[in-house]
Image: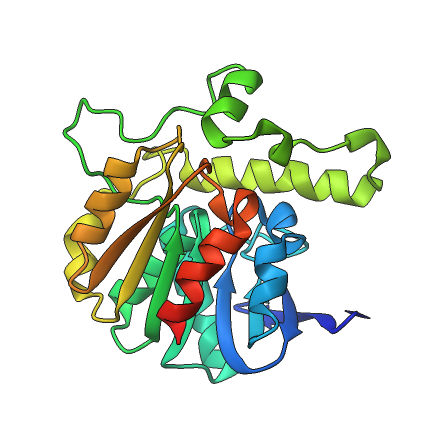
């Protein structure tokens, strides 16, 4: 399928069909979407990236229109699946942009293969434990009232609203499935791999970590600790943005990501 320079195809990896979106022109760039993949695909941030890069956007198993094999139960499994995808594509030593859950997957991939990525840009990545055993690093978004969750996720909650009655049934089903898969993969341990932080020393590529100043899911101190755990990590804050600054402040995020990738 093709639409305005975007092509969508399905590739079979380890017996599972996944949706692969390709968009733009220029040097190859792997884009690993987060749990808000539908909004991210429509965002000016992704559109702007496509003006300078040939985006390779594999929808993780369980997200978008990708199948979800039973053997995948964690971001660690997702990382191995994505490594197989890159092998099938013949891609190596390329830059990657990872968004929230996509950032976690990128880190799981990077610690497994040091030469995989040339540069890594992460926006609101999750996946590590930075505090003690009784410290709440990440808010429990599954047990709070939806209005409270929206206030934690967004600086401007209107950015995350959807008019579900007007959406095609297939899009509503994809959104529901994305939420289900996110919960399935990140429920236990809650939104982190206890071993990942101790492995981040293996990430040798320069890594930029960006954080929304008003992120209520995880504070800027969490993001800073993430960057400090990386040998070549740097950290930046995006004003007037929550957990998804790439959606709320696309120009500000792009202004930091593009020079870093260049």
Tell me if I can see residue 16 in this picture.
no
The image position of residue 149, as x and y in percent, is: 50, 23
Q: Nearer the viewer, residue 87 or 28?
A: 28
In this picture the colour scheme is rainbow
Q: What's the residue at 35%, 66% (across, down)?
A: 120
Q: Which quadrant holds residue 187?
A: top left
> Which residue is painted at 39% across and 28% down in the image?
216
Looking at the image, residue 228 sits to the left or right of residue 183; the answer is left
Question: Split into 4 quadrants, where in the image is the C terminus?
Answer: bottom left
Count of picture labels: 0
Residue shown at 64%/40% (left/top)? 177
Most foreground residue, 50 or 134: 50
Q: Quadrant of the N terminus?
A: bottom right
Please name the residue shown 52% across and 46% down the image.
Answer: 249
How far from the left and from the top, in percent, is residue 137? 27, 30
Residue placed furthest toward the top = 145
* Residue 181 visible from this viewpoint: yes
Identify whether 242 is placed above or below 74.
Answer: above
Residue closer to the observer: 34 or 90: 34
Side (left or right) of 132 relative to 65: left
**Residue 229, above or below 193:** below
Q: Position of residue 3 (x, y in %)?
A: 80, 68
Image position of 127 with respect to 57: above or below: above
User: x, y (%) of residue 214?
Assistant: 40, 32
Work out whether 146 lies above or below 111: above
């Amino acid at each position: 399928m093709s639409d305005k320079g975007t092509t969508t195809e399905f590739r079979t990896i380890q017996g599972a069909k996944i949706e692969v979106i390709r968009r733009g022109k220029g040097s190859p760039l792997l884009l690993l979407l987060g749990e808000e993949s539908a909004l991210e695909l429509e965002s000016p941030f992704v559109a702007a990236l496509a003006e300078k890069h040939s985006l390779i956007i594999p929808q993780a198993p369980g997200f978008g229109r990708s199948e979800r094999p039973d053997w995948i139960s964690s971001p660690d499994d997702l990382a191995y699946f994505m490594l197989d995808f890159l092998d099938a594509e013949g891609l190596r030593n390329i830059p990657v942009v990872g968004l929230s859950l996509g950032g976690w997957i990128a880190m799981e991939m990077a610690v497994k293969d040091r030469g995989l990525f040339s540069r890594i840009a992460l926006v609101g990545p999750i996946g590590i434990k930075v505090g003690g055993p009784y410290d709440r690093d990440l808010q429990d978004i599954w047990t709070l009232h939806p209005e409270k969750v929206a206030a934690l996720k967004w600086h401007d909650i209107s950015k995350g609203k959807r008019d579900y009655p007007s959406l095609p049934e297939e899009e509503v089903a994809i959104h529901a499935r994305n939420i289900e898969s996110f919960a399935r993969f990140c429920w236990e341990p809650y939104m982190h791999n206890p071993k990942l932080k101790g492995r981040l020393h293996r990430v040798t590529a320069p890594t930029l970590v960006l954080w929304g100043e008003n992120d209520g899911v995880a504070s800027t101190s969490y993001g800073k600790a993430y960057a400090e755990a990386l040998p070549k990590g740097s950290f930046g804050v995006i004003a007037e943005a929550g957990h998804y600054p790439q959606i709320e402040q696309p120009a500000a995020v792009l202004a930091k990501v593009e020079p870093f990738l260049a």
